Image (spheres, rainbow, N blue to C red):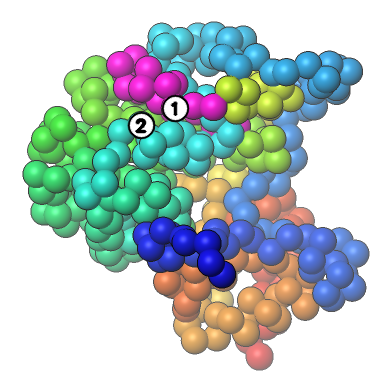
Amino acid sequence: MDIAVPKYLQQLKPYVAGKPIAEVQAQYGISSPTKLASNENPLGPSPKAIEAISKALKDIHRYPDSHCLSLRRKLATYLQIEERQIVLGNGSDEIMALIGQALLLPEEEVITPYPAFSIYEKVAVMAQARLFKVPLKELKIDLKKIREKVSSKTKLIFLTNPHNPTGSFLEKEELVVFLKNLPSSVLVVLDEAYIDFVQPQRRFNSIALLENFPNLIILRTFSKAYGLAGLRIGYGILTPELARFLETVRYPFNVNALAQIGATAALDDKDFLEKTQHTIWEGRQFLTAALTSLGVKVYPSEANFLLIYVGKKAKKIYEDLLKKGIIVRPMVSYALADYLRISIGKPEENQAFIETFKEIWQK
């Protein structure tokens, strides 16, 4: 090919998503597979979102509100912050991309835990920044080592809380100490995609930290707890000054009309959110106990998934589960080849997984 491709792009690999249901149906002839691979809401979308979207279908010939005003106002009230502190995107990963475009310069340094969500790496590479990956310690984010890696050229640190793919959780006290010991010139992106699944006694209001740490950017999504993954909508919470820079590089109409309408309605669906949370908490407890009783190492999780260690048999177990119509997530793309990640499903899906896994595990 005669077209010159920038060298920095050659190190990137396409994102590896969970195996689609349609592919399993076609490959194995299974009519109704159980998908526990992509950390989706097992209960489906918020009913209030479905109702609002259905009413709005007749208007999809119109462009969406480029500034997402209705949703922005609703979110600001819900979160008790200013409207100008919110940036909305086509999934929270678009907000990550905006951060890279607006605030990162070539040769500046980005630090991420490793393994972690691959988009963090992509943000750094696309900005031609220098990327440093700090290995997890006992499969938890090692804040001490990350701090040691900070230099005068460090611009951005990505953290996930709860962490994907391990489900581990940073307590408020350790996060505050970490932020206090950072130069104020270093931006910290706190990805809270799974924050709604943290047990109430452990969860804390990270937004309140913005008052003392204006270098903090918090990311959240409607994909998980509200069941709107297919609509692709997330948002960033940050200082108005930083938000203004992200808005300058944001493309118009980046959030589609149905996503805006669905998310706005979902914020009012408190019953659905609570039902989702209890489904995850109960399912997490059930799967942890059941897998532990089989002698499987299960890592403590505050997310809507569990990471389990199954050793060298991981690939075969994954494939055997697929043949039985159970889709889980192999961890090869996260450099955890001996592990599997299991999304929490509905009670009957969790039970089906355990029964099938037990049969395969004990062979």
Q: Is there a contact, CB below 8 Å, between mark 2 and mark 1?
A: yes
Residue 288 shows up from this direction: no
Q: Residue at x 84, y 16 (%)?
A: 59
Toward the viewer: 341 or 362? 341
Toward the viewer: 86 or 268? 86
Residue 356 vertical position relative to residue 165 in the rendered view, above or below: below
Q: Residue at x 14, y 30 (%)?
A: 184
Residue at the bottom extreme of this rendering = 363
Q: Is residue 236 magenta?
A: yes
Quadrant location of the C terminus in the rendered image: bottom right
Q: Amino acid at mark 1?
A: Val
Choose the circle earlier in sequence order: 2 or 1: 2
Residue at the front extreme of this rendering = 2
Q: Position of residue 183 (x, y in %)?
A: 11, 35
Toward the viewer: 234 or 345? 234
Q: Position of residue 284 (x, y in %)?
A: 56, 53
Secondary structure at badge 2 equals helix
Q: Amino acid at mark 2?
A: Ala
Residue 180 shows up from this direction: yes
Q: Residue at x 71, y 22 (%)?
A: 257
Q: Position of residue 326 (x, y in %)?
A: 73, 68
Q: Residue at x 86, y 70 (%)?
A: 26
Residue behind mark 2: 102
Q: Which residues are magenta?
A: 233-251
Residue behind mark 1: 249
Quadrant in the picture for residue 201 = top left
| For residue 239, side relative to residue 360 (left or right) | left
